[in-house]
Amino acid sequence: MIKPDAVAEGHTGAILKMIEEAGFRVVAMKKTQLTPERAGQFYAVHKERPFYNDLCDYMSSGAIVPMILEKENAVTDFRTLIGATNPANADEGTIRKLFAKSIEANAIHGSDSDENASIEGSFFFASTEQY
């Protein structure tokens, strides 16, 4: 998911180009905006964490671009492509190194497992929207 900071800064096209050039196939994609409630549902796993409310506020602050991607070893390869959560620690050439503004506004979200990728994809897309 391309996050509100990166969408607002006009980086959606550049990020999508990097994703496709890395060999990912876009199965589903749309531009939308989360309500604070929907952001809370998406990040429910973090509900007890001190940053939860700020995260929900941030993720509902502007448009996002959720996607479902396919590739052999997709989760591992995507985590490598996006870089470390803290852009200061991200490798050169990664999405976060190039486009993130901070650890909070870090440009992009990537699922951390195949199971979570399936759950997160279903959160944003009906099966009829996946090609």
Image (tube, helix red, strand yellow):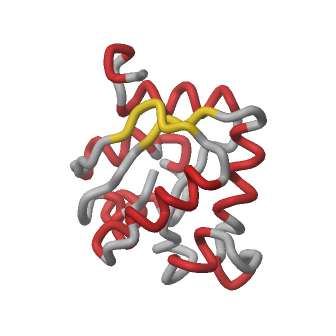
Q: Nearer the viewer, residue 102 or 27?
A: 27
- Residue 29: x and y in percent read 37, 40
Measuring 48% from the left and 68% from the top, which residue is drawn there?
107
- Residue 14: x and y in percent read 45, 67
Note whether 11 is above or below 64 in the view shown: below
Q: How many marks?
A: 0
Q: Quadrant of residue 93?
A: bottom right
Measuring 52% from the left and 77% from the top, which residue is drawn there?
100
Note whether 15 is above or below 88 in the view shown: above
- Residue 58: x and y in percent read 34, 66
Note whether 66 is above or below 109 in the view shown: above
Q: Nearer the viewer, residue 65 or 112?
A: 65
Q: Quadrant of residue 75?
A: top right
Position of residue 16 in the picture relative to residue 77 (left or right): left
Measuring 56% from the left and 50% from the top, which residue is drawn there?
20
Position of residue 96 in the picture relative to residue 32 (left or right): right
Q: Nearer the viewer, residue 102 or 75?
A: 75
- Residue 63: x and y in percent read 25, 58
Measuring 33% from the left and 66% from the top, which residue is drawn there?
7
Position of residue 7 in the picture relative to residue 104 (left or right): left
Where's the C terminus, which quadrant? Answer: top left
